[in-house]
Image (spheres, rainbow, N blue to C red):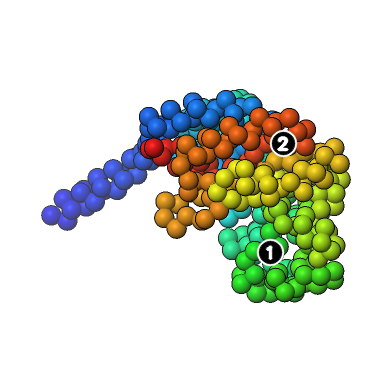
Amino acid sequence: MKCRYLGVIILILLAGCSSDKPVRMPPLPENPQFIANTAEIKPQISSLPQAGVVVSAYTYDNYRYNPGELVNRLQEVGINQIYLDTRDYDRGFFGKELEAFLATMKNAGIPVWLLFSDEVVYEKRKFDKLFPRPSNLTYDPELVKPLKKFIKSCGDFHGIAFALTPHLCNHQRTRSLYRWSDNTYGIGGENDMLMKTSLKLAANLKKSIGQIPLALILPHFFQARAEAGDLSVGRLSDFAPFVSQFVITAFAETPSQSMAMVEPHLKEAAALNREIMVGLLADDHYSNQRPDSIANGSFAAFKDDLNKIVPELVKRHEFGGIMVINYRGLEILLEKPE
């Protein structure tokens, strides 16, 4: 009897050891609404100098075994570059599939920017082992060394996109020397000190990555506050010497509202003979959507707004295109039935 039970146990163990890993199902096919809507807006999106989307870790996970399917969907919309959001995950999350993912995008002519945020340096909720936490937010050149190591492990990509967010998540920066507040503007104030630190951090990152292009993602209000004398740094000109691409986030329910918010940046970019991309929010949650997301409105309104503003925007050499945050949010907008 004991031998009989032992034989059953061995068979169970052998069956468990020999079983293949579960096969990932391919992403669901595009619905008819997505196909129809992308056909309507692709002419306008394709006319932009650059059209990018942020690909979240969630989206990457959906397509990691089928990157070609993501390429098809991006090309249907007219997207020509992506920003792969890496900021809350370590290299292990992306797995060995990352190299094939990057190669597929490159073969399709879609540059991939690895997107990081300064929160991995200052907060590092999931980077505790990778990034040593500073005791304050004063400048420390050592902070970017682990980031450089992470970048080196990722394979063939186009560039690094770095979001400066000293104004966010103060409640999590419990060991910070300075904290951002509406009440701490002014030259030499806490907000100003955070901006100076951000400038040094970004400059040191560029020095560390050498010839790799650096895209810098900045919120639209830095420029206005600097022009008003509330911050000593924050203009495009402060970052221009070491930045290959500027992305200015201006979140609103319509692209035309976002463009109005970045008009000061467009004027400065023109004076610097540079160009900016405009970051639009497409919130990827069906519930609790942010009021400043283009995914809140109808597809028809989005299409009409693009038709209204794009022909004039593409005439301006300082306008570099758009970056949509996030791709899944854009899909939600394009899948909406009218």
Q: Which residue is mark 1?
A: 167
Residue 110 is drawn in which quadrant?
top right
Q: Say whether disc 2 or disc 1 marks the residue closer to the N-terminus.
A: 1
Q: Quadrant of the C terminus?
A: top left
Near mark 1 (Cα within 10 A), the count class, few <14, some 14-19 or many ≥20, is: some
Question: Mark 2 sits on what residue?
Answer: 320
10 Å crowding of disc 2: few (<14), some (14-19), many (20+):
many
Identify which residue is drawn at 68% across, 36% down: 321
Whether residue 156 can be seen here:
no
Question: Tag 1, which secondary structure?
Answer: loop
Tell me: 128 left or right of 190. Answer: left
Amino acid at circle 2? Gly
Q: Write the residue at 45% across / 52% down.
A: 285
259 and 185: which is toward the camera:
259
Q: Residue furthest left?
A: 1
Residue 308 in the image, given as x and y percentages of width and height:
60, 34
Classify mark 2: helix, strand or loop: strand
In this rendering, does residue 47 appear at all? yes
Horizontal and vertical percent position of residue 52: 62, 37
Mark 2 near mark 1, Cβ–Cβ under 8 Å?
Answer: no
- From the viewer's perspective, is residue 230 above or below residue 273? below
Tell me which residue sits at (66%, 60%) in the image: 119
Of the numbered discs in the image, which one, if any, rests on residue 98? none
In the rendered view, tell whether residue 188 sits above or below residue 235: below
Locate the N terminus and report the quarter of the image it occupies.
bottom left
Task: Find residue 50 and report its horizontal and vertical position in percent.
Answer: 67, 33
Marks 2 and 1, Cα distance to the nearest angstrom? Answer: 25 Å
Identify which amino acid the numbered label 1 is placed on: His
What residue is rendered at 37% in x and 29% in y?
Answer: 32
- Of discs 2 and 1, which sits in the foreground? 2
The quarter of the picture where residue 232 lies is bottom right
